[in-house]
Amino acid sequence: MKHWLFKVEPDVLSFDDLLRAKGRRTVWDGVRNYTARNLLRDELARGDLVLYYHSNAEPSGVAGIARVVRAGHPDPTQFDPAHPGHDPASRAEDPRWFAVVVQAVRKLPRFVTLAGMRAEPRLARMALLRRGNRLSVQPVTVAESRVVLELGGLERPELEL
DNA sequence: GCCAACGTTGGC
DNA sequence: GCCAACGTTGGC
């Protein structure tokens, strides 16, 4: 099982919003970046762990964990002319953009702030913390994931790995 | 294929 | 609100 970090602005869908959503799940659609697209299409698998990160927030940080419950499939919004992510150049038989479905697992007992992660030497190499990183779906190592869950106050982080 | 211009992200 | 960093677009 692989581990990922998803960025989302909490004004759009906070982790608490996801917990309240029907089935505690949502379609992760609207991603229009080729690097993230490749990950969604080729790498994310059902059962993978997702660190749910609030970006552009006060404070920014990891709020909870989720799981991929449906692997990559064509993002329907690319074919919807009314959707801001509509892509007239994408064809149904060769879709350009992909989505997954994620389901909330649990909220972290302690919100793990960006500053808290920066202060943790074991996370020094984490992709999120690298300067200029804007990728909205990014890989996280199992070791990094474990540290984040530990910072988040989970008593038995290994149970989630 | 190069690269300037532009738009977006996201921390601060 | 500022602005650095990055991705994308499009002229050539």
Image (spheres, coloured by chain):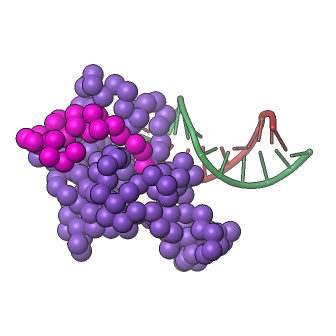
Chain colours: A purple, B red, C green
Q: Nearer the viewer, residue A3 or A63?
A: A3
Q: Which percent across, then down, holds residue A12?
A: 35, 61
* Outermost residue to the top: A121
Q: Nearer the viewer, residue A142 or A120?
A: A142
Q: Nearer the viewer, residue C9 or A161?
A: A161
Query: Residue, x 45% and y 63% (percent of image)?
Result: A72
The number of numbered discs placed on residues in the rendered structure image is 0
Query: Residue, x 23% and y 51% (percent of image)?
Result: A65
Q: Which percent across, then down, holds residue B10?
A: 41, 43
> Start and end of the magenta stretch?
A137-161
Does any portion of residue A122 appear in the rendered image?
yes
Q: Nearer the viewer, residue A11 or A25?
A: A25
Q: Is residue A9 above or below residue A73?
A: above
Q: Is residue A40 above or below residue A87?
A: above
Q: Is residue A152 magenta?
A: yes
Q: Quadrant of residue A59?
A: top left
Query: Residue, x 34% and y 60% (percent of image)?
Result: A46
Query: Residue, x 47% and y 45% (percent of image)?
Result: A135
Q: Which percent across, then down, holds residue A94?
A: 63, 69
Q: Which percent across, then down, holds residue C1?
A: 47, 42
- Compared across the picture, whether A95 is left or right of A71 comes to right
Q: Is residue A54 magenta?
A: no
Q: Quadrant of the C terminus of chain A?
A: top left
* Outermost residue to the front: A1
- Compared across the picture, whether A91 is left or right of A83 comes to right
Q: Quadrant of residue A149?
A: top left
Does any portion of residue A30 appear in the rendered image?
no
Q: Quadrant of residue C6?
A: top right
